[in-house]
Image (cartoon, helix red, strand yellow):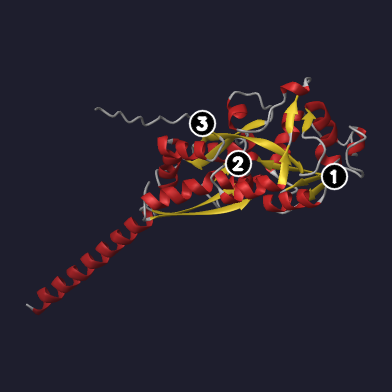
């Protein structure tokens, strides 16, 4: 009887140990987030902060158990963080190339690259600059270092060399211009202002400066910061051959293609499993997320539907 009781105790202990192990293994394998719950951390090119922050705030407001952290940095740092596995989602101004995708392909991991919006590169000038139009040829010569002083374009322009200001030395804006215009920007001196606000401030205080920023920082008419930035500088219009056919980098001209330096904004994430990142991506690309994009003054990837109210009398 005593022996049978000891065997019974041993059986219970083994059963409990096995159950705890099974529970522990299930906890290890279980995802830490779902499409509407949990925590993720995104790395984003700082140029796209005005486009991504309203998405985050609205999503978290709807799904109160979701927490999305965002690090705003350079395009290169965002990509490197994704490649190192420090983040499973990034927001940048270009798709990943084959070399960057190869580590994921070798592991059988799908990388999803969705276009969430279209924006443009804006060139901003001092408020008192005597002109607000630049030709594509003039811009190319400035960015390639062929034109070093404003007076080489027009004797009435400010004295001194042209100072090009960017948010960072390795800004995605600069690399986009390099690829779009076929430039070698290594020979051009770039003033790194550390932030878009820094670019605006530098241009505001230097009449011979030209700043390079993403237009989403200036395009939201209902945003206080956007309006404040816009009042401090002058946005340059671009033209090819005819000054009368210039285009400013705003929503309509981005949508119809008349502004030449437009680009896609990519939401790039790992498709290894379904989780909060896929839920957030679905929201951004859905009707509500695209309406938020439209409101910020840039162009949604998919034109959202319009709600029309009919009143019967």
The residue located at (47%, 40%) in the rendering is: 292
Task: Pick the residue in front: 17 or 136.
Answer: 136
Residue 290: give x, y in percent of width and height: 46, 36
Q: Secondary structure at mark 2?
A: helix
Label 3 or label 2, whichever comes before in sequence order? 2
Task: Point out the residue furthest to the front here.
Answer: 313
Q: Secondary structure at mark 3?
A: loop
In which quadrant of the rendered image does the C terminus lie?
Answer: top left
Disc 2 marks which residue? 216
In which quadrant of the rendered image does the N terminus lie?
Answer: bottom left
**Labels 1, 2: front one:** 1
Density class for disc 1 (Cα within 10 Å; few <14, some 14-19, many ≥20) is many
Disc 3 marks which residue? 301
Kindly report the distance in space between the C-alpha atoms of the residues bearing marks 1 and 3: 36 Å
Residue 22: give x, y in percent of width and height: 29, 59
Residue 296: give x, y in percent of width and height: 54, 41
Density class for disc 2 (Cα within 10 Å; few <14, some 14-19, many ≥20) is many
Residue 59: give x, y in percent of width and height: 42, 48
For the question of whether residue 57 can be seen, the reply is yes
Q: Secondary structure at mark 1?
A: loop
Label 1 or label 3, whichever comes before in sequence order? 1
The residue located at (57%, 36%) in the rendering is: 298
The residue located at (68%, 36%) in the rendering is: 121
**Labels 3, 2: front one:** 2
Kindly report the distance in space between the C-alpha atoms of the residues bearing marks 3 and 2: 15 Å
In the image, is 137 to the left or to the right of 78? right
Disc 1 marks which residue? 208
Label 1 or label 2, whichever comes before in sequence order? 1
């Amino acid at each position: 009887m005593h022996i049978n009781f000891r065997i019974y105790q041993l059986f219970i202990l083994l059963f409990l140990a096995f159950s705890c192990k099974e529970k522990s293994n299930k906890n290890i394998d279980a995802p830490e987030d779902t499409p509407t719950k949990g925590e993720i951390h995104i790395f984003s090119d700082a140029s796209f902060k005005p486009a991504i922050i309203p998405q985050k705030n609205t999503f978290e407001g709807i799904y109160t158990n979701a927490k999305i952290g965002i690090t705003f940095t350079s395009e290169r740092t965002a990509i490197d963080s994704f490649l190192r596995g420090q983040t499973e989602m990034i927001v940048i101004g270009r798709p990943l190339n084959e070399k960057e995708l190869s580590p994921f392909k070798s592991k059988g991991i799908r990388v999803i690259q969705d276009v969430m919006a279209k924006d443009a590169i804006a060139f901003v000038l001092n408020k008192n600059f005597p002109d607000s139009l630049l030709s594509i040829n003039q811009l190319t010569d400035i960015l390639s270092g062929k034109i070093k002083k404003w007076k080489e374009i027009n004797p009435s322009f400010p004295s001194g060399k042209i100072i090009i200001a960017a948010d960072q030395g390795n800004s995605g804006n600069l690399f986009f211009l390099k690829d779009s215009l076929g430039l070698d920007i290594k020979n051009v001196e770039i003033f790194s202002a550390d932030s878009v606000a820094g670019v605006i401030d530098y241009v505001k205080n230097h009449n011979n400066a030209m700043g390079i920023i993403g237009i989403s920082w200036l395009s939201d008419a209902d945003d206080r910061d956007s309006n404040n930035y816009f009042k401090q500088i002058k946005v340059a219009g671009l033209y090819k051959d005819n000054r009368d056919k210039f285009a400013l980098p705003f929503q309509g001209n981005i949508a119809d293609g008349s502004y030449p330096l437009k680009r896609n904004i990519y939401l790039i994430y790992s498709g290894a499993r379904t989780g909060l990142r896929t839920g957030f991506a679905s929201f951004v690309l859905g009707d509500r997320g695209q309406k938020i994009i439209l409101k910020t003054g840039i162009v949604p990837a998919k034109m959202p539907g319009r709600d029309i109210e009919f009143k019967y009398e």
